[in-house]
Image (cartoon, rainbow, N blue to C red):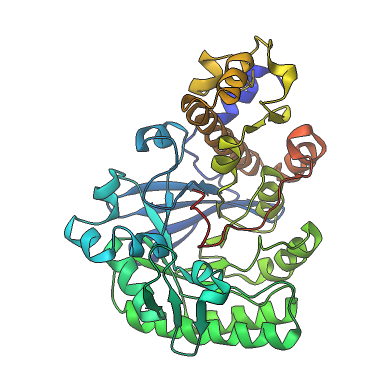
Amino acid sequence: MLQSDWLALARPTRYKPRPRYGALTRRLSNVEFQLLGTSAGARRGRMSFAGRGVVETPAFMPVGTYGSVKAISPEEVRDSGAQILLGNTFHLMLRPGDELMKRLGGLHRFMNWSGPILTDSGGFQVWSLSGLRKITEEGVKFASPVNGDRLFLSPERSIEVQHALGSDIIMQFDECTPHPATERQVRKSMELSARWAQRCKDAHADHPGALFGIVQGGMLPALRLESLQRLTQIDFPGYAIGGLSVGESEDERLQVLDAVGPHLPADRPHYLMGVGTPRDIVQAVGRGVDMFDCVMPTRNARNGHLFTSQGVIKIRNARFRDDDGPLDPNCDCYTCRNFSRAYLHHLDRCNEMLGPRLNTIHNLRYYQSVMTRLRSAIEADRYEAFAADFIASPEGAPSKVARVAVPASSPPEA
């Protein structure tokens, strides 16, 4: 593909559905979801948020754990093409606290982000505390990783915190199923999450935010489908697939998506939590997923691992010491337009603060360009050809980076 063609695909476009597709529209609390078209299982949609703007799907959400995408400003996040952010309920509840956030006007005003925000429930973070927490029917008792205080997080408390943050999309409180696990362990965990889902729905009441249910069930397709059936009976505005990116193989993850994807309600958005590499995202889009989040582009950027149209570049490698070329000749981000690989290598070797900033600007722009190219492929009804070409290219090579999500006791990795 010529550089001009690649850059044209990477620019956001306002897509109007082709007549043969039509449009399926569903009003979901404060958000209207339109399914504009499909291509071999991949979905092209649009989420319109009251007062917050539009999110074209498939969409990738940068992670802002503490109300900040690490190393860059909200304006730079917007410039990358991001339309929606993810915030972390657990960490914001601890610092600065949900009461203060509410007094200051919510997370949007606090961080100066005018677009939509999705917040996770805190379920994974408290689950990951391991020996520092105790899970019961009522919720989770745990020791704060900040100061050791004894705290309690329940479905009702999670919803209360997310309301205080002013979230546009609110996630149910759930238990992340351990991996590996026995069928008995998986069932017990899935059933607990299903009961918590109903409590979240009751606590959410008539709040305008869109509450999403989370499908659990480990790597067992039958339990995944049972989880989904329980959630659809409760009736949520959107559905997420959780409990992945916990160390499973690619084949295991795709098996879960193959089982669940066809049964997700077509008129609701579908969200795959915590995944993943560009390869992972392209594969999941073909299985009906609309929304993604992952710390990978920002975390890897700070470690000098950069995603490009030519594959992953480890910028600290000595071979880039005198490389005067742009990081990615097919990228239009600020970093690629202004700095050489040699300069980025120098910043990395010297531990200069500018290095992680420039790397993050690039990685986020790259991820957004992949989403734009995916949307364009679906619009043209050529998803299968695009996915095959992508997976066969250096961009789609299997990643050697671990996919395990970051536990709450570790430094936040947004």
Q: Residue furthest left?
A: 103
Q: Nearer the viewer, residue 342 or 42?
A: 342
Q: Nearer the viewer, residue 45 or 24?
A: 45
Q: Residue at x 29, y 58 (%)?
A: 96
Residue 7 visible here: yes
* In the displayed structure image, the side of residue 159 where residue 394 appears, left or right: right
Image height check: is 95 above or below 15?
below
From the top left corner, tell me how far across and down residue 270 is, in percent: 56, 62
Q: Residue furthest front?
A: 148
Q: Nearer the viewer, residue 84 or 320?
A: 320
Give the quadrant of residue 139: bottom left
Quadrant in which the N terminus appears: top right
From the top left corner, tell me how far across and down residue 46 is, in percent: 47, 51
Q: Residue at x 35, y 33 (%)?
A: 75
From the top left corner, tell me how far across and down residue 74 is, in percent: 36, 38
* In the displayed structure image, the side of residue 181 where residue 139 appears, left or right: left
Image height check: is 120 above or below 369?
below
From the top left corner, tell me how far across and down residue 309 is, in percent: 69, 28
